[in-house]
Image: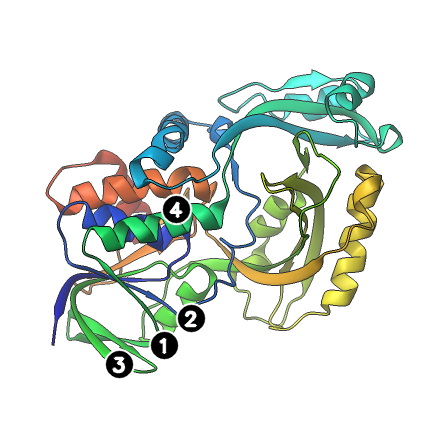
Amino acid sequence: MTTYDWIVIGAGVTGASLAYELSQHNFKVLLLEKDPKPDNATLYSYGGLAYWSGTDELTRTLGQQGIELHRHLSEELDADTEFRELDLLLTINRQDDPETVAQSYDRFAVTPELLNVRDACLLEPLLNPNAISGVLKLPHGHIQAQKTTDAYIQALVRNGGEIVYERVVELTYTEDRAKGVTTTANSYSGANIVVCAGGLSRSLLQKSGVAVNNEYTHAQLITTPPVDLELATVVMPAVQQRFMLEAQPAAIDPETPADQMILDPGAVQFMDGSLCMGQISAVSNCSEFDLTAAEAKIRDRVGSVLPLLEDIPGTCHSCLVAFNRQGIALVGKIANITGLYLFSGFTSTLVYAPVLARRFAQAQQGTEDPVIEQLQLILNQA
């Protein structure tokens, strides 16, 4: 039986970027993914690169490193990630005071420009001027997250890594050392196992007797085929309820009988003309949702801000979105089991995860990295 240096569980953007970076250091890497056809948070991602959102030295540094990495990533991976830089408009509700909302963004690395309704609609003609009192304008990066993930996987394979589509059902370890994983079809041996399964990371680890504070919400959003109209910017609300939801005590354990649901209306258009609209975020012990009802709610709320998008044909989807309450990510060795790691629960995933994947891989090669060490301390406290 082949023994891998690293078994990476989960081929979303976090797992794919980490597997690639480990392969860059000549580690023998196996990437395991449950679905040959993606159906996860990466596939349904807006693709935004909020490099402007750092609030301290660490996040500002990682944000700048993240946007620089993405500016050169297509060339590095020899595949088009559809990277571009465009404006992000954060809409301010009609009843809210623009100056007050703008002040809440003073802590970020980039200070947004406050635009009045007239200037906002000149920049984004699809906006409904009667629904807003202004917008905050920010520089923003954007990628096609699934194409970026596919590019990472292709580069991994070129480096000699492997990807296998089988669902992991159990992590195997003896006493205090990781041994490998068992899937629905096979067993694999590995010196190190890193769980990058997003919203499924928590339950997978729990099955193996390991508890982590990697939380998740249920997200619901609409994707469309290519359309004729053109959205000039990325549009999102300035006051995002998702972050408030994640901060509430009920969000600590989504498996308890509690149901909370919020909707942040926004939209983005990809380079092929398709759209993503949403999103609803829910904390619930329910695993199935009424997507017909969710679609109607999303269309109503998005349509109030961007009326021409309300009736565009599309499909409503649901996926899990991982988060944590301790910091920017849960990265490092978990529990007291040698060779067992977690790489999940990111904020600003598309900005931070590729940078931290690179730093993590370099650290495994022996390069000291104060950022990875800091995140390890946070994980130990989680």
311 versus 334 height, above or below:
above
Q: Pointer 2: what residue?
A: 203
Where the N terminus falls, by quadrant?
Answer: bottom left
Q: Earlier in the sequence, mark 4 or mark 3?
A: 3
Position in image of residue 376 (x %, y %) = 27, 47
Residue shown at the point (66%, 30%) measured from the top left = 233
**Which label sits on residue 363?**
none
Q: Nearer the viewer, residue 376 or 120?
A: 120
Can residue 50 be seen from the camera position used here? yes
**Which label sits on residue 329?**
4
3D distance between C-alphas at marks 1 and 4? 22 Å
3D distance between C-alphas at marks 3 and 1? 18 Å
Q: On the picture, is 181 further left or further right than 25? A: right
Q: Nearer the viewer, mark 3 or mark 2?
A: 3
**SS under mark 2:** helix
The amino acid sitting under disc 2 is: Ser
Q: Nearer the viewer, mark 3 or mark 1?
A: 3
Quadrant of residue 204 within the rendered picture? bottom left
Residue shown at the point (67%, 47%) measured from the top left = 226
Q: Earlier in the sequence, mark 3 or mark 2?
A: 3
Dots 3 and 1: beta carbons under 8 Å?
no
The amino acid sitting under disc 4 is: Ala
The amino acid sitting under disc 1 is: Lys
307 versus 10 height, above or below:
above
Quadrant of residue 104 within the rendered picture? top right
Q: Pointer 1: what residue?
A: 207
Q: Nearer the viewer, residue 260 or 150?
A: 150
Where the C terminus falls, by quadrant?
Answer: bottom left
Dots 1 and 2: beta carbons under 8 Å?
yes
Mark 2, residues whose alpha carbon is within 10 Å: few (<14), some, or many (≥20)?
some
Q: Nearer the viewer, residue 371 or 274?
A: 274
Residue shown at the point (32%, 69%) measured from the top left = 210
